[in-house]
Image: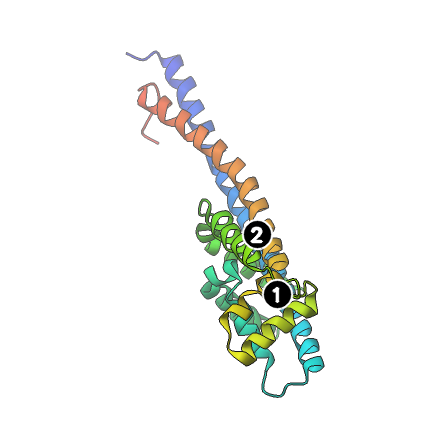
């Protein structure tokens, strides 16, 4: 028979562990929400900047057959992370546009938008947190593209690489378009870095949570706690 003092002590420890697990889950979720805001803002900024670069390059090219949308569609093929979360990202954009179109007072717009971005982060976390997905797929494709780019005439500056992509659209040449992956690599790397930092920080919460749950399971299985509550 379990001594009363032991029963009280271990039951208190069980409640303490349960509370600590709840805090770690909350911290993990909050970090996912912060990640959603960070990633959404980063992708939107990159999209705006890229659009400007494309329009500037097209203006210099002066080719009426090529539209900015054509080039964007080609470059989108190389945006690994955004392609994986395309559905939730488009849904978040649409919701934010709807929020900004509402007639509300004060900072309500900002709070509603931030909340939606946070929800976006929680929604996509199971996708972007998959082990090795970012590193292996992106690193392999990027390195392969660079190793195949042996043409010393291929430009490495921003406008030059955009020109490569635009020429690929005009000519319909997949090989030529492939060289444009160098243009997207800095942006994709920046997105990947955002994801990687969040993964490392959330991993700390998850490891601590696993340790607490293991301790809790051992405590309960020992039969020295009250299990009526």
Q: Tell me the number on the disc at residue 44.
A: 1
Residue ID at (50%, 55%): 141
Q: Residue 197: image x %, image y %?
A: 59, 45
Corner quadrant of residue 117:
bottom right
Q: Quadrant of the C terminus?
A: top left
How far apart marks 2 and 1 lie (CA) works out to: 15 Å
Give the residue displayed 57% in from the left and 73% down from the top: 72
| Among numbered discs 2 and 1, the one appearing first in the sequence | 1
Residue at screen point 52% across, 43% down? 28
- Residue 146 screen position, x and y as percent: 57, 56
Report the number of discs.
2
Q: Secondary structure at mark 1?
A: helix
User: In the figure, 64 relative to 185: above or below?
Assistant: below
Label 2 sits on residue: 192
- Name the element at disc 2: helix
Name which residue lies at 47% across and 64% down: 86
Q: Quadrant of the N terminus?
A: top left
The answer to whether residue 105 is visible is: no
Circle on res. 144: none
Residue 85 left/right relative to 50: left
Q: Where in the figure is residue 38, as x and y percent of width and height?
A: 61, 55
Q: Quadrant of residue 107?
A: bottom right
Q: Is residue 61 or residue 154 the one in the foreground? A: 154
Which is more toward the observer, 144 or 6? 144
Give the crowd class for mark 2: few <14, some 14-19, many >=20 residues within 10 Å: some
Label 1 crowd (10 A; few <14 / some 14-19 / many >=20): few
Which of 92 and 196 lies nearest the eye of the viewer? 196
Residue 135 in sight here: yes
């Amino acid at each position: 028979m379990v001594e009363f003092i032991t029963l009280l002590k271990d039951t208190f420890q069980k409640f303490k562990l349960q509370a600590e697990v709840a805090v770690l889950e909350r911290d993990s979720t909050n970090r996912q929400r912060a990640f959603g805001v960070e990633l959404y803002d980063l992708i939107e900024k990159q999209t705006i900047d890229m659009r400007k670069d494309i329009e500037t390059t097209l203006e210099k090219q002066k080719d009426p057959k090529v539209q900015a949308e054509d080039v964007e569609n080609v470059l989108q093929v190389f945006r690994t992370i955004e392609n994986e979360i395309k559905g939730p990202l488009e849904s978040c954009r649409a919701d934010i546009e709807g929020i900004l179109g509402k007639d509300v007072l004060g900072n309500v717009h900002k709070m509603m938008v931030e909340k939606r971005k946070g929800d976006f982060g929680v929604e996509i976390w199971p996708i972007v947190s998959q082990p090795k997905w970012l590193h292996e797929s992106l690193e392999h494709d990027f390195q392969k593209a660079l190793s195949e780019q042996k043409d010393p005439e291929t430009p490495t500056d921003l406008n030059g690489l955009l020109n490569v992509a635009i020429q690929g659209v005009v000519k319909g040449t997949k090989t030529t378009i492939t060289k444009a992956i160098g243009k997207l690599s800095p942006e994709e790397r920046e997105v990947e870095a955002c994801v990687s930092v969040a993964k490392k920080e959330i991993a700390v919460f998850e490891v601590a949570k696993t340790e607490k749950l293991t301790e809790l399971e051992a405590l309960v299985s020992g039969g020295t706690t009250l299990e009526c509550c």
